[in-house]
Image (cartoon, grey):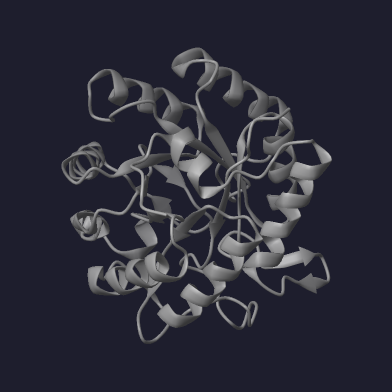
Amino acid sequence: MNNPCIICVAITGSLPTKDNNPAVPISISEQIESTHEAFEAGATIAHCHVRDDDGKPTSDPDRFALLKEGLENHCPGMIIQLSTGGRSGSGKERGAMLDLRPDMASISVGSTNFPTRVYENSPDLIDWLALEMRTHGVKPEIEAFDLSHIFQAKLMADRGEIVGTPYVQFVMGVKNSMPVDREVFDFYVKTVKRLFGEDAPWCAAGIGRQQIVLNDWAVSSGGHARTGLEDNVRIDKTTLAPSNAALVKRVADLCVKYERPVATWQQARNILGLRAVKE
């Protein structure tokens, strides 16, 4: 293959703490530094959450604004993707930062079970988040926790609620949700191509020790890959990941193995149909 592979780094998330791994970046300055290292290692999308002064997840738009400004200054051209995830707030609070006009934002278009709770995404909230993204020119990344979410993305695109070809990310390995299963993964890929076209870009994310498995499947199958300390804090069973950059390097090594170039930020923006930025 010679199609470039986009590497997304999920730098912080809502759950990992420094007790889990001291390398998890919590403060805004730590997140900027960690993302810069990951950017230099080959990541071209930064999937971002923010934390409050106690290290707890928040949807505070002021903190997102500080992070966005810092990433734009220190990682010029990198695609900034803000999370509207449910652990950081409730209701419309989850999309309060969308008027910052990031390049992208995550959106879950259906509910699913998580380890100890229901990740609730009501139709009204989904419609509102999608409207905010259209209003502010933000490209959604569809976080698909099961097959129905891919079909929901197709329905939303057909109704004009998602502009352009949806960018779908398969999330596998969350306890009580979709496990890591190769036949299911292959069917996800087949379904995306059938619904959105053979050349439609897609991504995959694996949780915990399954991260490297999904990285391998995605790179070898022509998709794009997500890594980072949000999803996995280890290099292997006994070794903590020293940084987000170290996890990005693992994906870059897979790209070498499967003879795929790592996408530059210019290529990534072109693949995803994002607005250009000055070099």
Using the image, determine if residue 86 lies above or below residue 195.
below
- Name the one closer to the observer, 217 or 238: 217
Position of 253 with respect to 31 (left or right) is right
Position of 100 with respect to 17 (left or right) is left
Q: Residue at x 74, y 33 (%)?
A: 220
| Observer able to see residue 27 | no
- Name the one closer to the observer, 178 or 249: 249
Q: Picture coordinates of residue 256 (x, y %)? A: 79, 44
Q: Residue furthest front?
A: 279
Q: How many marks?
A: 0
Hey, which quadrant is residue 208 in on the image?
A: bottom right
Position of 168 with respect to 133 (left or right) is right
Using the image, determine if residue 112 lies above or below residue 9.
above
Q: Picture coordinates of residue 36 (x, y %)? A: 54, 69
| Observer able to see residue 97 | yes
- Name the one closer to the observer, 138 or 241: 138
Q: Residue at x 41, y 51 (%)?
A: 118
Q: Residue at x 51, y 33 (%)?
A: 146
- The quarter of the picture where the N terminus appears is top right
Hey, which quadrant is residue 92 in on the image?
A: bottom left
Q: Picture coordinates of residue 102 (x, y %)? A: 31, 54
Position of 45 with respect to 110 (left or right) is right
Q: Picture coordinates of residue 148 (x, y %)? A: 44, 27
- The quarter of the picture where the C terminus appears is bottom left
Hey, which quadrant is residue 28 in on the image?
A: bottom left
